[in-house]
Image: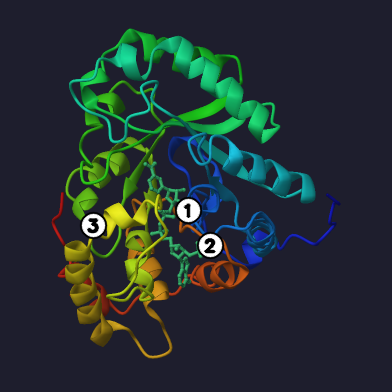
Amino acid sequence: MSNQHLAISNPKDGMQQRTFGRTGWQVSEIGYGMWGMAGWTGSDDEESLAALGRAIVLGCTFFDTAWAYGQGRSEQLLAEARRRYPHAPMRIATKIPPKNMRWPARAEDPVSDTYPADHIRAFTEKSLRNLDAEAIDLQQFHVWSDTWADDEGWQRAVRALKEEGLVGAFGISVNRWQPTNVIRALRTGLIDSVQVVYNIFDQAAEDELFPYCQANNIAVIARVPFDEGSLTGTLTADSRWPDGDWRNTYFTPERLHETLERVERLDVLIPEGMDLPELALRFILEHPAVSTTIPGMRRVQHVERNLAASDGQRLPPRTHDALKRHRWERG
Ligand SMILES: NC(=O)c1ccc[n+]([C@@H]2O[C@H](COP(=O)([O-])OP(=O)(O)OC[C@H]3O[C@@H](n4cnc5c(N)ncnc54)[C@H](OP(=O)(O)O)[C@@H]3O)[C@@H](O)[C@H]2O)c1
C-alpha cells in the first residue's frame, strides 16, 4: 500500500488536548476506539483505514486497540495507518487478553488463569509484532478483578516491561458496570490509566473512581461514549445484527425497548444545531477527570462529526445538569 504524504494538522490549531495523567503525554481529548473495525459485522478494511487516516489528519492522537479485536487484526490496521502517516504524532494503546479468554473477568478465577507473568510478556510481544512497533505507549489489562491486585507475578511483569522500554505505561480496562473493581490495583502505584464505560447513561464512574484518579494523577479513558450505538440515535425497535455480532447480546429485545424509551427522553435536551452524538460526547468532555474518550468509528463521516466536538465549547450548565438526571443503573 502506498505512503500518503498528507499534511497533519497542528493539534494546537484544531482538537483540544488533555494531559494523560502522570505520563505527562498530551493527547487529543477525543481518541479513537478500534474494536468495531475488527470485531463487528459490516466492517471494510479500506473504509476503516480511510477513517483512521482522516482522524490522523484532523489531529486525533490517541488510538485504542486490543489483541482481542480480531486476534490482532485491529492492531494490524493501526500499523498500516502508521505506515501511511509515518510522521503523525500517535499514542498507541492496546490490551492483553486474559489467558483463559473469559469476558468479563470473574473474581473466583485465579490470576494464574488470567494474567501470569509469561502470558503478559508473550502477548506484549505479539502486539508489538502486529503493531510493527518497537514499543507500546500504553499496554492495558483487557479485563480485571481486584482479587488479583496483590499478586506479585503481574506486578513483576509490569515493572520489567516498563524498565526494558517495551511498554511506556500500563493501564487497566475495568469490567462494565464495575467501576470500582480496580481501586486496589491502582493503590500499587503501577497502573497509570483506567479505561471505564462512561456516558450519559453510565455515570457511576463519577462516584469513587474519578475522584480517586484525580487525586492520584491517573489517566481516565472514557470508553463506549455512545452506549454501543444507542446514544447516536440511529437504533430502532427493529435493529438486529447478523448472527455472531455482539450487539445482539447487548441489545436484547427487552433491553433495546427500554433503551429506546430512554434515548427518546433525551430529545428535548439537544440544543439547537447539535445532534445526539455530539451531545453525548460533550457530556463526557465536561468531566475534568476524563483524559480522552474513544468513540468507535469506521466511517470518515463519523470521524469528522465526532472530532469536531473537540472545540473547547462547553455545554450550557442547565443542559449538563439535566443530563445528569438520565443516569441509568444497570448490571
Ligand atoms: N473491555 C474493553 O476494554 C472495551 C469494551 C468496549 C469498548 N472498548 C473500547 O471503546 C471503544 C468505543 O466503544 P464501542 O466502539 O464499543 O462503542 P461506542 O463508541 O459507544 O459506539 C460505536 C458505534 O457508534 C457509531 N458512531 C460513531 N460515531 C457516530 C456518529 N457521529 N453518528 C452515528 N453513529 C456513530 C459507530 O458506527 P461506525 O462503526 O459505523 O462508524 C458504532 O456503531 C471501542 O472501539 C474500544 O476501543 C473497550
Q: Position of residue 255 (x, y in %)?
A: 19, 62
What kind of colouring is applied to the model shown?
Answer: rainbow
Count residues near mark 1 (Cα–Cα under 10 Å), then give few for <14, some for 14-19, many for 20+: some
Foreground disc of the pair 3, 2: 3
What residue did someone put label 1 on?
40
The answer to whether residue 117 is above or below residue 235 is: above
**Ligand 1: which quarter?**
bottom left
| Residue 16, numbered label | 2
| Residue 202, numbered label | 3
Which residue is depicted at the point 52% across and 50% down?
A: 34
Which residue is depicted at the point 47% across and 18% down?
A: 120
Nearer to me, 53 or 230: 230
Q: Is mark 1 within 8 Å of ligand 1?
A: yes
Which residue is depicted at the point 16% across and 64% down?
A: 254
Q: Residue flagged by tag 2: what amino acid is it?
A: Gln
Q: CA distance from mark 1 to mark 2?
A: 29 Å
Q: Is mark 3 within 8 Å of ligand 1?
A: no
Q: Position of residue 183 (x, y in %)?
A: 23, 31
Q: Residue flagged by tag 3: what amino acid is it?
A: Asp
Which of the 4 image quadrants contains residue 277?
bottom left
Residue 309 seen anywhere in this rendered image of the structure: yes
Nearer to me, 16 or 65: 65
Q: Residue flagged by tag 1: what amino acid is it?
A: Trp
